[in-house]
Image: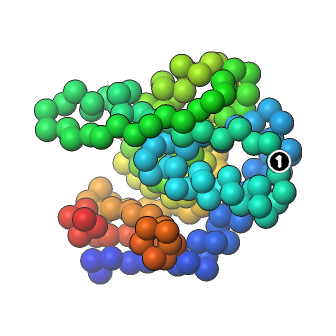
């Protein structure tokens, strides 16, 4: 395999965001009892894009939107050599009895989502939590977690790395599959 391969280019990326937003509108209508929560740090770029698209293009008003840091809820937080930097949690609402759309860029082992579910409990008991991911790496799942709303499913070996790049930081929206994690750095 080549060292890297673009699996979603900018045009398909925009279509995927649009499709995911339309799926959310079909499921949650006017979002009156639904909130969007991006997982810090990498899920926030996707959640912001989803939120803006819903408000600006699909004219959905009054969506509760938050950013959730999971650093201290991770199961590898206290492991030797773990270098983690906490982000800021920005949630000015409770999730009590609400539908929560938890957003992350890539679903891989499921451990990030597990930490997010634990952190989310500090904001109440949701009616329902659904996961939205841009990329679902179906292989190597360690926990029984699945994405409800998925941009693309990718079958990649353990050594491979999936990286989501954003126009505001990398100049172009795209998803790249690297054959080796070292190549992605």
Q: Residue furthest left?
A: 80
Where on the picture, by quarter, is residue 94? top right
Q: Is residue 90 left or right of residue 163?
A: right
Residue 3 lies, with reference to residue 43, above or below; the image says below
User: What residue is drawn where x is 54% and y is 36%?
Assistant: 90
Residue named by callout 1: 61
92 or 125: nearer the viewer: 92
User: What residue is drawn where x is 29% and y is 81%?
Assistant: 2
How was the colour assigned to the protein in this rendering?
Answer: rainbow
Q: Is residue 35 left or right of residue 146?
A: right
Residue 12 % position (x, y): 61, 76
Per the image, label 1 sits on a secondary structure element best described as loop
User: What residue is drawn where x is 55% and y is 21%?
Assistant: 121
Q: Name the image quarter holding the N terminus.
A: bottom left
Q: Is residue 138 left or right of residue 49?
A: left
Residue 105 % position (x, y): 49, 54
Residue 58 % position (x, y): 82, 60
For residue 24, say whether it is visible: yes
114 or 97: nearer the viewer: 97
Q: Name the image quarter holding the C terminus.
A: bottom left
Q: Residues within 10 Å of mark 1 (few under 14, many from 20)?
A: few
Residue 116 lies, with reference to residue 165, above or below; the image says above
Q: Is residue 10 left or right of residue 98?
A: left
For residue 150, say whether it is visible: no
Residue 88 lies, with reference to residue 42, above or below; the image says above
Where on the picture, by quarter, is residue 40? top left
Residue 118 % position (x, y): 48, 24
Where on the picture, by quarter, is residue 20? bottom right
User: What residue is drawn where x is 56% and y is 56%?
Assistant: 46
């Amino acid at each position: 395999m080549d060292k890297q391969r673009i699996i979603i280019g900018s045009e398909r990326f925009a279509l995927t965001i649009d499709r995911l937003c339309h799926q959310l509108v079909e499921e949650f209508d006017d979002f009156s009892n639904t909130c969007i929560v991006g997982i810090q740090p990498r899920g926030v770029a996707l959640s912001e894009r989803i939120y803006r698209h819903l408000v600006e293009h699909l004219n959905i008003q009054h969506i509760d939107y938050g950013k959730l840091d999971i650093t201290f809820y991770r199961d590898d937080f206290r492991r030797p050599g773990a270098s983690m930097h906490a982000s800021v949690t920005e949630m000015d609402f409770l999730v009590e009895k609400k539908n929560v759309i938890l957003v992350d860029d890539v679903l891989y082992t499921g451990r990030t989502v597990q930490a997010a579910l634990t952190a989310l409990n500090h904001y109440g008991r949701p009616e329902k939590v659904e996961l939205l991911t841009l990329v679902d790496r179906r292989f190597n799942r360690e926990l029984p977690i699945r994405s409800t709303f998925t941009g693309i499913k990718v079958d990649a070996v353990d050594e491979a790395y999936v990286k989501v790049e954003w126009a505001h930081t990398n100049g172009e929206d795209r998803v790249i599959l690297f054959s080796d994690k070292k190549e992605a750095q």
